[in-house]
Structure formats: C-alpha cells, structure tokens
Amino acid sequence: MSREQIVTGAADMIRRRGLNATSIREVAKHAGTPLGSTYHYFPGGKNQLATEAVRWAGDTVSKVLAAKLRKGPVDGLKAFFGLWRQIVTETDFQAGCPVLAVSIEETASADALAAAAEAFRTWSGQLENSLQDHGVAAGRAKSLAQLVVAAAEGAVAMCRAQRSIDPLDNVASELTTLLETAVEA
C-alpha cells in the first residue's frame, strides 16, 4: 500500500462525507491499509492527512486544467466542468470537491485551509493567465477566473443536493458563452 493510495482514499472520503465525518481509522479501512501504516506515513494525524489530500486534489485538477488551457480558456473551462460532471455522475451524486469540503469545515486545521486556499488560487490563476493570453484585460480576467471556480463549486453542491446534473450543465453553458464573448472582445 503506497502513501499516495492513502492520500487518494482520504480525498475520496472527504469529498463524500466531509472532513468531520472522516477519521484516520475509516481512511485506513477505505484504502485497505493497516491503521499503523497510516500513522507511520502521517504522524501528524488527521490534520496532516487532510492537508495532503487537499494538495493532491488541487494538483490533480490543476494538471487537467494545464493540459486543456493550452488550447485556450474555453477549452479549460469545458475540461474543468467536465471533470466535475464526471465526478458527480460517476459517484451517483455522492461526491463533490474535497477542497471545498475542507474549506467549509470549522475544524479544519490552518494547514488544510491554507492548502485549500492555494488550490483555489492556483485554479483561478491558471484560468486568469489563459484569459489574459487570449486578450482579456488583467482585472476582468481575474474576476472571470474566480467566477468560474466559484460557480463550479456551487454548481457541484447544487447537483448533489438536487440529485441532478442540470445545475452544473447550465452554469457551464452560461460561463462558456461568457468566456467566448470575453475572448472575442
């Protein structure tokens, strides 16, 4: 059992249950690893594991964005929403974003919150840079990028609550039109 399997197992549990409802013992069971191995790899306990799970999730999404943003901000947006669509539908509306889940937890450690903030900044920054590279003014690019990330996170939450993919698809469609217009201007 690798360290990364424990981290991905923690991210999966956090995105499904939230941070408070995720324990080290449950992560070990979910990842199929001995409890002792989990504490060996994560001597800082749940806070360390949650921080690393958020970093892993942030990096995973960032890589998807980086690959698609090479073609432009609209392709990046479509990939970003496509990823969330896949997660929500493949888990039958049981999973969302572990970064958001940690962000809203009162008991999240400072390190986990810092990792979540960094993930959101990275995703927004990637979109912002792509928008600027395609002619959108810096201030507008920043606000549009933050709108995309915030809207995606909110749409995922709505999908889970309503057990419908419609909010995500509708938000993606509107934001696609908005970015296409911004890039053409």
Image (tube, grey):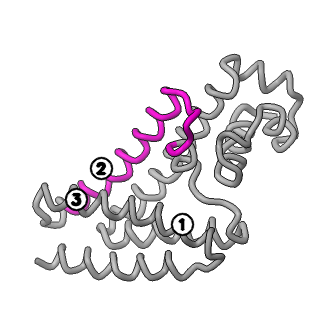
Task: Please provide the residue range marked out in magenta.
Answer: 103-131
Q: Which residue is mark 2?
A: 125
Instruction: Decide if residue 20 is on the left or right side of residue 119.
Output: right
Report how far apart the C-alphas of labels 2 and 3 lie in the structure. 10 Å
Q: Nearer the viewer, mark 2 or mark 1?
A: 1
Q: Residues within 10 Å of mark 3 (few under 14, many from 20)?
A: few
Q: Which residue is mark 3?
A: 143
Residue at 13% over, 55% down: 138
Q: Considering the whole magenta stretch, tell me its main secondary structure.
A: helix
- Of residues 29 and 160, the one nearer the viewer is 160
| Image spot of residue 65 (x, y percent) | 42, 58
Quarter of the image where one finds residue 41:
top right
Sequence order check: which comes first, mark 2 or mark 1? 2
Residue at 22% over, 59% down: 143
Q: Which residue is mark 1?
A: 156
Report how far apart the C-alphas of labels 3 and 1 lie in the structure. 20 Å
| Image spot of residue 130 (x, y percent) | 25, 60
Sequence order check: which comes first, mark 2 or mark 3? 2
- Of residues 5 and 98, the one nearer the viewer is 98
Please say if 58 is above or below 24: below
Residue at 72% over, 47% down: 13
Three-letter residue code for mark 3: Ser
User: Secondary structure beneath disc 2?
Assistant: helix
